[in-house]
Amino acid sequence: MNAALRLVDSPAWTIAGWSLLHYLWIGPVLGVAAWLLRRAVRPLSPQARYAAAVATFAALAVAPPFIAWRVATQQGGESPAAVAPLAAAAEQPLPLDPTAPTRLAPALPASVLPPLPPAAPPVETIDAFVARHGTNALSAAVRWAPAVWLVGMPLTFAFLATGLFGAERLRQRSSLLADGPIADATRRWAEALRITRAVAVGVSDRVVAPLVIGIVRPMIVLPAAIVARQSPEQMEMILLHELSHVRRADNLVNLIQRVVEAVLFFQPAVWFVSRWVRLEREHCCDNMVLSYTGDPQGYAETLASLAMPGISPAYAAAAMANMDRSAWAADVLREALRGVVVQDRRKSSDRGDARDRLGVASPPDLEAENAA
């Protein structure tokens, strides 16, 4: 108990509390700046947008240590060397002139002095009241903020560890494709992308969209439902997209994002910018697929078939009817379709509404799910 009280009263605890409180308002400021930056870089290439998103996320990640350094510097106050002369001067008695005449006022008798009125209670002004209670609230917040953070952070790291263990279980339970056209296409595209590591391919009925797991030993996991349904051209586009994640080391960056999210779980701006990073990451891989295939129409139809199992890819062509057949068109369509992949399996009864989404000329701006 005494050790806990000493920790709460320690300077490090106070610095941590003030740093957390300052980050609560500095984070939203950076979030608004990220929103403005996102709108400003929208006409740029996916790579430029991704770089802007990563730079903003890095700023949010390094802000707390910088704030803690500033708080520690300010709490240090004046140095002892600067304060010592002032203290020594204050201890010296004032010099007196012994030759100066001393005049004393004559003492009055007590009967002559009027009685003193009773002292009135002090009246506290509104400003003093607000300052006193505001200071008390800040002191309580500084005292409790590190405790709340220490309770929440292990929980978020527990969720992160659960996801990592789940990915490893998925690897073990997936059926490995060592031979066949899918394995051959994977090796061919990995060589074209100059990927030196061996990339395995597996099939599982536990996933609803293709994804990549692993950093040192990457593995592409394909839903069992799409292996028999996709054409060879569509399957190669899917593999090329997932191999793009491997080439870019996106899983490593994504793991760093997860760690930052676990540490700064209390800041909504971190989650907002992190989603932006994942969205632009998917767009970069889309752009790589289009640069190698040069077929935005076919890629849009592939995405449509992933989003709507059992529905003709012609709906993707309808969505692109009023669009220029370019990489931008497929990019915009993909931004709408990626968010439907998981919802389609969860809400299979609502097919009509999902078809309407595919049939519009300008799909809404939906957040892309991270498939890697």
Image: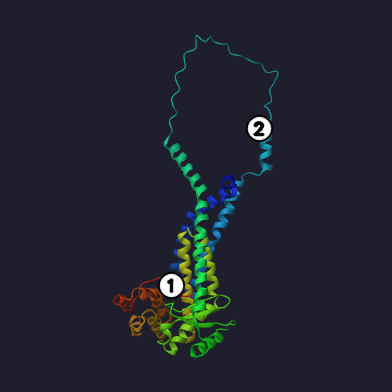
Disc number at residue 288?
Answer: none
Number of numbered discs on residues: 2
Q: Amino acid at mark 2?
A: Ala
Tell me the mark number nearer the camera, choosing from 2 and 1: 1
Which residue is more in the foreground, 247 or 342? 342
User: Which numbered circle lies on residue 90?
Assistant: 2
Real-space Cα distance between discs 2 and 1?
A: 67 Å
Q: Position of residue 255 (x, y in %)?
A: 53, 69
Residue at 50% of width from left, 80% of height from top?
A: 220
Please report the residue visible at 66 percent of the width from the left and 44 percent of the height from the top.
Answer: 79
How many neighbours does mark 1 have within 10 angstroms: few (below 14), some (14-19), or many (20 or more)? Answer: some
Q: Position of residue 90 (x, y in %)?
A: 66, 32
Mark 1 highlights which residue?
Answer: 369
Please give the name of the residue rendered at 43% of the width and 24% of the height, measured from the top-left corner.
120
Quick check: can you spot residue 342? yes
Q: Is residue 33 rendered to the left or right of residue 360?
A: right
Say left or right for 364 vs 247: left
Left or right: 348, with 188 as reference point: left
Q: Are marks 2 and 1 in contact (CB under 8 Å)?
A: no
Residue placed most toward the observer, 178 or 12: 178
User: Residue at left 52%, top 68%?
Assistant: 54
Q: Are there few (<14), some (14-19), or many (20+) residues within 10 Å of tag 2?
A: few
Say which amino acid is labelled 1.
Glu
Vertical relation: 293 (above or below) 117: below
Secondary element under disc 2, as helix, strand or loop, is helix
